[in-house]
Image (cartoon, rainbow, N blue to C red):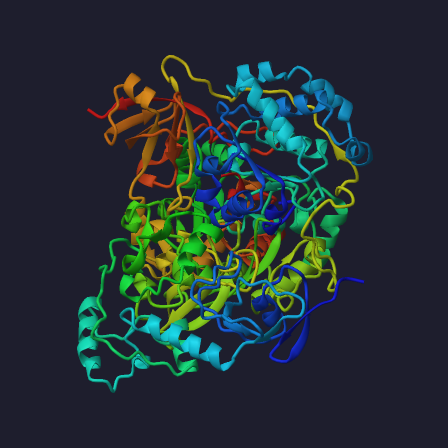
């Protein structure tokens, strides 16, 4: 018999395995403890203090993400002091930047001034890019927290737009460190870190370079894990979550087969994110998979069959193009034999497409001259 | 891959060779980097270029181009002479160990140093590190296969893995990283001259009979067909009359492009089915527009044999169709009805005729893919191959001697050229070069040259230079870099306007028919 370790959370007696954190045990038992900086697959730091809990007999609240469960602990996850602490934490985060969404208590007088300032800095009349898809906003609603005083909100570092993919909006950064974790512990690209101290604290690339001049490889993992509007994809900055439909699929670049979500708005793909709940990538993507989808809607896609006449292509109907193809292939098969025809199928198309090409080559053309680019 | 991607993090030692993983399989490279940084795995990188992974490596061996059999035999020499091999595995699971043993006898560390340029002590250290691991995963890619000795190279890695009992266990295996999203699937589907789906040989009468029955046809051809690398020379000689090319751009990706262009130009009839007007489509007689991956339903099979769903997110442009539909319509017009309602119906037929896909359905892979072999509806799939025995029973050790690359440097062509990809682009660039941001990051082709060679040949950094081989010449920007060793030049092959494949050698591996993209001889000169 194993050691029976038990812990009591909100009155529930729960078994756990040594090494589990309080947060782990809670989640295994469907007890919700809110988190913000916590990132699956990385070492917890307790940095943001949203996940604090109350342990009986302890004078101070502890962060549940990095406190190990111990036999006999009695834990409250929503005690009065816990709630008060979380409210204070959230309030502080809200007041440290351009969080111009409805949770900023728009009835206050300083709101208008503040909103105008943010619009100028954003160069846009939109609300925060993360509005509606923001962990901080969710928590603020949950705990009914509003920012109070807007007059002291100063933007220390200007927005960085100087690369093709990622906007770094330091005014909205809450310094939770999820991006640093993602870069160093998940993708292990080691491009960003915390820099400077005190009020000047900032996420820096290298010795505070522009991303494009740093070791960043634009995998965009940081964008995906950013819980607020500090890191957003440049091409989908103000595409709101509720305007897009998500479709799960498989990336079409290398053979890893990352699972992706297309974000589709008005019949166009506006964004791709990594699917977090499944192998093989658990949310990770590379720069091509995440940002390299413009080709889908490129102006120069082939849209209609083409037939070459006198050295030039002209548009044709499907019937015309297919009849011509069938006729010429039949003639050549008849005259020269099936083995003078070759088919190259593709490592780019689906299994179903490949199967159809394979069956056609063997059953209709009656040759085994079929290959694809595995060798190239 | 014999093992899974996630399994890489279970390894004690990871040996990466001929794979610039951070550029070509970035997400998989994270598994390697995490294993090293956070799980105490040791990393051995064997690569002629100073690739990013070398920064994470405990040992980086830098061989001369095309000397893989020599260093692998060298490792095995040390392992056997120091008695570090897995005798139980060899006894129970393999045959022909004695043949291997006598072959590698001459591959002493000193002899290997002469061939590969890797210091003898590094061979010894790497051998000990590899052999003392509980589980060692070998990852390799085109740097191993794209040689005239590519098959020898792969068999040598298999020898090494069997020698230390690293097959069939978690964290072990011999793992080729597939470079394109569905190379695995195209092979599984029988897009090869010798097999139907699931590697059922066309020369096997039983397999042919089964397919004839399933398809309602007679007289399926029983002779192995031609590989692409054989079709092209046949076209050159006028013996290949027509080709139907789906989603490929051989006029950038083939070796010795000048020769390939003439060959495709000789065809009586060329039909190209693609999403863009590629270099290959331009010379076609008929172009058929197809839907891209975001516009269709279907499946891809990834490098770890996991069959995963592809789903339609947006409509195809104009009147473009799914590839399978176009092919089916040609078949119909040639007198054979291929009337599928949708991709799901095709997949059901695939599962019916392909034992390793037999238990996979769209419903089962709705949320997460399955690894083949998955022969039955209640089979969980097979993440790790060869756990109890090899497909054919016992694994055979192959005694393989070292053979140098087909082309050697000489006075006229004094440098070796090797080719590959960069992070920001993909293959012939048809897709990635249509994303502005990727072009901003990697706008044009370049030739990596060592500082010593630049000095020797009077080349300035960032200047335009001519690179010429016996087959062709291109103009690219010189990039002086410590990525390459002196004596070697690297050029990515994505850029059609400076196509590296005008230079490459079309000499083939005799078994796999893979061209030797990774080694040829070139010369450099400044642009006047």
Q: Which corner quadrant of the image does residue A263 belong to?
A: bottom left
Residue B519 position within the rendered picture, expressed as x and y whole percent measured from the top left:
46, 26
Q: Residue at x 58, y 49 (%)?
A: B5
Number of on-image labels: 0
Q: Residue at x 30, y 79 (%)?
A: A104
Q: B490 above or below A139?
A: above
Residue A348 position within the rendered picture, expressed as x and y whole percent measured from the top left:
49, 52
Q: Residue furthest bottom?
A: A107
| Quadrant in the picture for the C terminus of chain B | top left
Tell whether B389 sits left or right of B136: right
Q: Residue furthest top?
A: B411
Q: Which corner quadrant of the image does residue B331 belong to?
A: bottom right
| Quadrant in the picture for the N terminus of chain B | top right
Residue A343 position within the rendered picture, expressed as x and y whole percent measured from the top left:
52, 46
- Residue closest to the eye, B431 or A224: A224
Q: Is residue B46 visible?
A: yes
Residue B164 position within the rendered picture, expressed as x and y whole percent measured from the top left:
71, 33
Tell whether B13 sits left or right of A328: right
Q: Residue at x 48, y 25 (%)?
A: B65
- Residue closest to the eye, B287 or A195: A195
Q: Which corner quadrant of the image does residue B215 belong to?
A: bottom right
Tell whether B458 sits left or right of B256: left
Q: Is residue B239 visible?
A: no
């Amino acid at each position: 018999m194993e050691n029976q370790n038990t812990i009591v959370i909100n009155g529930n007696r729960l078994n756990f395995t040594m090494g589990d954190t309080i947060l782990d045990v809670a989640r295994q038992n469907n007890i919700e403890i809110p988190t913000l900086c916590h990132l699956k697959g990385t070492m917890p730091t307790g940095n943001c203090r949203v996940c604090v809990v109350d342990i009986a007999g302890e004078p101070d609240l502890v962060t549940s993400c990095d406190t190990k469960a111990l036999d006999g602990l009695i834990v409250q996850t929503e005690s009065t002091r816990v709630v008060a602490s979380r409210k204070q934490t959230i309030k502080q985060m809200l007041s440290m930047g351009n969080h111009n969404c409805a949770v900023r208590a728009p009835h206050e007088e300083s709101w208008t001034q503040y909103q105008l300032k943010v619009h100028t800095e954003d160069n846009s009349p939109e609300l925060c890019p993360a509005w509606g898809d923001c962990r901080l906003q969710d928590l603020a609603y949950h705990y009914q927290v509003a920012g109070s005083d807007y007059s002291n909100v100063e933007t220390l570092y200007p927005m960085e737009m100087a690369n093709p993919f990622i906007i770094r909006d330091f005014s909205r950064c809450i310094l939770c460190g999820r991006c640093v974790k993602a870069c160093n512990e998940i993708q292990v690209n080691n491009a960003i870190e915390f820099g400077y101290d005190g009020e000047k604290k900032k996420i820096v690339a290298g010795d505070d370079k522009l991303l494009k001049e740093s070791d960043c490889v634009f995998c965009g993992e940081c964008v995906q894990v950013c819980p607020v509007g500090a890191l957003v994809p440049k091409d989908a900055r103000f595409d709101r979550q509720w305007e897009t439909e998500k479709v799960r699929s498989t990336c079409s670049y290398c053979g890893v087969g990352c699972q992706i979500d297309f974000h589709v708005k008005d019949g166009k793909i506006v964004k791709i994110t990594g699917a977090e709940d499944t192998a093989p990538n658990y949310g990770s993507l590379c720069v091509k998979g995440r940002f390299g989808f413009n080709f889908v809607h490129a102006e120069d896609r082939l849209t209609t069959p083409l037939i070459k006449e006198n050295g030039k292509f002209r548009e044709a109907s499907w019937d015309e193009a297919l009849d011509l193809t069938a006729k010429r292939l039949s003639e050549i098969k008849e005259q020269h034999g099936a083995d003078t025809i070759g088919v190259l199928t593709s490592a780019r198309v689906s299994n179903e497409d490949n199967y159809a090409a394979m069956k056609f080559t063997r059953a209709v053309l009656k040759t085994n001259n079929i290959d694809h680019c595995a060798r190239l | 891959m014999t093992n899974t991607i996630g399994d890489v993090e279970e390894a004690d030692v990871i040996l990466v060779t001929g794979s610039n993983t951070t550029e070509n399989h970035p997400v998989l490279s994270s598994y390697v980097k995490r294993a090293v940084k956070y799980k105490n795995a040791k990393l051995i990188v064997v690569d002629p270029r100073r690739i990013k992974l070398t920064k994470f490596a405990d040992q980086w061996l830098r061989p001369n181009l095309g000397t893989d059999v020599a260093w692998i035999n060298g490792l095995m020499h040390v392992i056997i002479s120091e008695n570090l091999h897995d005798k139980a595995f060899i006894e129970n699971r393999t045959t022909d160990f004695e043949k291997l043993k006598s072959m590698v006898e001459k591959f002493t560390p000193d002899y290997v140093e002469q061939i590969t340029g890797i210091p003898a002590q590094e061979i010894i250290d790497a051998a000990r590190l590899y052999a003392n691991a509980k589980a060692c995963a070998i990852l390799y890619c085109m740097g191993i296969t794209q040689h005239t000795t590519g098959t020898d190279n792969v068999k040598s890695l298999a020898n090494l893995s069997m020698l230390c009992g690293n097959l069939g266990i978690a964290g072990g295996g011999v793992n080729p990283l597939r470079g394109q999203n569905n190379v695995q699937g195209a092979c599984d589907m029988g897009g090869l001259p010798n097999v139907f789906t699931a590697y059922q040989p066309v020369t096997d009468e039983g397999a042919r009979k089964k397919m004839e029955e399933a398809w309602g046809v007679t007289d399926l051809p029983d002779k192995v067909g031609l590989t692409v690398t054989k079709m092209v020379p046949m076209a050159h000689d006028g013996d290949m009359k027509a080709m139907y090319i789906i989603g490929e751009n051989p006029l950038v990706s083939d070796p010795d492009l000048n020769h390939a262009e003439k060959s495709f130009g000789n065809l009586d009839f060329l039909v190209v089915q693609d999403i863009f007007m590629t270099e290959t489509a331009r010379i076609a007689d008929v172009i058929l527009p197809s839907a891209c991956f975001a516009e269709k339903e279907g499946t891809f099979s990834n490098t770890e044999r996991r069959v995963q769903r592809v789903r339609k997110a947006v409509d195809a442009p104009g009147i473009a169709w799914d590839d399978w539909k176009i092919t089916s319509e040609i078949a119909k017009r040639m007198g054979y009805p291929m009337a599928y309602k949708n991709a799901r119906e095709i997949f059901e037929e695939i599962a019916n005729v392909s034992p390793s896909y037999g238990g996979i359905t769209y419903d089962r892979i709705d949320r997460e893919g399955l690894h083949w072999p998955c022969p039955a509806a209640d089979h969980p799939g097979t993440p790790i191959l060869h756990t109890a025995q090899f497909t054919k029973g016992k694994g055979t050790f192959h005694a393989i001697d070292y053979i140098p690359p087909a082309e050697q440097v000489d006075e006229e062509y004094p440098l070796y050229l090797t080719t590959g990809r960069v992070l920001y682009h993909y293959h012939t660039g048809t897709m990635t070069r249509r994303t502005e941001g990727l072009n901003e990051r990697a706008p044009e082709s370049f030739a990596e040259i060592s500082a010593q060679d630049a000095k020797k040949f009077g080349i300035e950094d960032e200047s335009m230079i001519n690179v010429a081989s016996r087959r062709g010449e291109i103009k690219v920007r010189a990039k002086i870099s410590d990525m390459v060793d002196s004596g070697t030049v690297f050029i990515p092959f994505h850029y059609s306007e400076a196509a590296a494949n005008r230079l490459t050698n079309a000499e083939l591996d005799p078994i796999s028919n893979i061209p030797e993209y990774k080694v040829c001889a070139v010369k450099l000169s400044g642009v006047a």
